[in-house]
Image: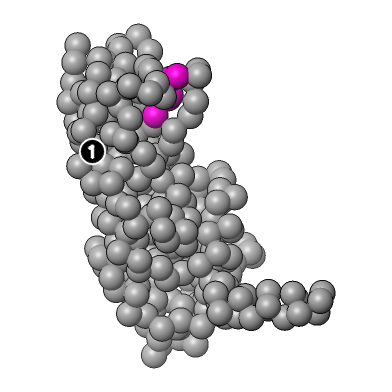
Amino acid sequence: MMEKTKAIVLRITPYSKTSQIVSWITPDHGRLTTLVKGACRPKSAFLGQYDLFYTCEVIFYKNDRHTVHIMKECTPLQSRETFRGNWRAMMCASYVCDLAWRVSQENHSQPELYELIQSSINYLSKGNIKPQFIAWFELKLMDILGMAPQIARCHSCRNEISSTTFRHVSFYPSQGIILCPGCSAKTGESAIPVTPDILAMLMVWQASDSAKLTGNTRISEKQLVALGKILGTFLDYHLDFVPLSRSIVMDTIQEKPQAKHNKQIQETVNEV
């Protein structure tokens, strides 16, 4: 049976000398895995029709007995050429697609996940590269998966948390909850202290459906480290993994290009 859907390329894996396995995220089928026969042949009809981060319209033969389906036709809708010239944007998009591949389900409708991935890579394709985008994306992803941290109120006494109420609160990544200082003192479980500025960022980003908001947020290196620890630990507890791509992309987009360039010049001079 043939089916048609919009799909975003997440991964491309060689299958043979001329064929490839392509993994997609789709609104109707969740993660879709297709075999593209003869994709690498010089006269293949699939040449240039798909690549990483492309959005395509695909027609495939659905295999009810297996999870790999046969590609029939593929038409590119968005190629996002920016990623071919902006490697920092490409690294962020790779992390987005890597997480999507890991958390998506095969043959299961996931329109919200598809929309998040599409809006995220569209945003990144405009060259908007800020470390805080990663925090926003992870918060929205966990929300879609039904695992969003509960940070608006103290989980125990139910008092609202605000920067004017408490100097610091405690975040419990295993439960994804916040406790005020009074309630936190009553439990022996390990927690991560959260300052008002970090908590305010998390609350605003969690409530926002647009990544543009993160680009307008000024953030220090110290705050980035704190955010990375909070969300990284939370992901590890609830997804049972933290992809290696996360630490790589965080190091990459925090790098100051001019400082690195000056350092390379100085090292070259010293060698001479």
On screen, residue 245 above or below 63: below
Q: Residue at x 45, y 19 (%)?
A: 18
On screen, residue 233 above or below 11: below
Q: Is residue 243 left or right of residue 83?
A: right
The residue lying furthest to the front in this view is 272
The residue stretch that appears in magenta: 18-22
Q: Is residue 57 left or right of residue 239?
A: left
Q: Residue at x 40, y 68 (%)?
A: 129
Instruction: Name which residue type carries label 1.
Output: Pro
Q: Quadrant where the C terminus lies?
A: bottom right
Front in this rendered view, residue 187 or 118:
118
Front in this rendered view, residue 129 or 116:
129
| SS assignment at label 1 | strand
Residue 108 in the magenta stretch? The answer is: no
The residue lying furthest to the bottom in this view is 164
Residue 157 in view, yes or no: no
Instruction: Give residue 147's position: percent from left, percent from top.
Output: 39, 51
Q: Residue at x 19, y 11 (%)?
A: 1
Task: Name the colouring of the figure.
Answer: one colour
- Callout count: 1
Instruction: Give residue 140's position: percent from left, percent from top.
Output: 34, 57
Front in this rendered view, residue 160 or 233:
233
Residue 94 in view, yes or no: yes
Q: Is residue 207 left or right of residue 200?
A: left
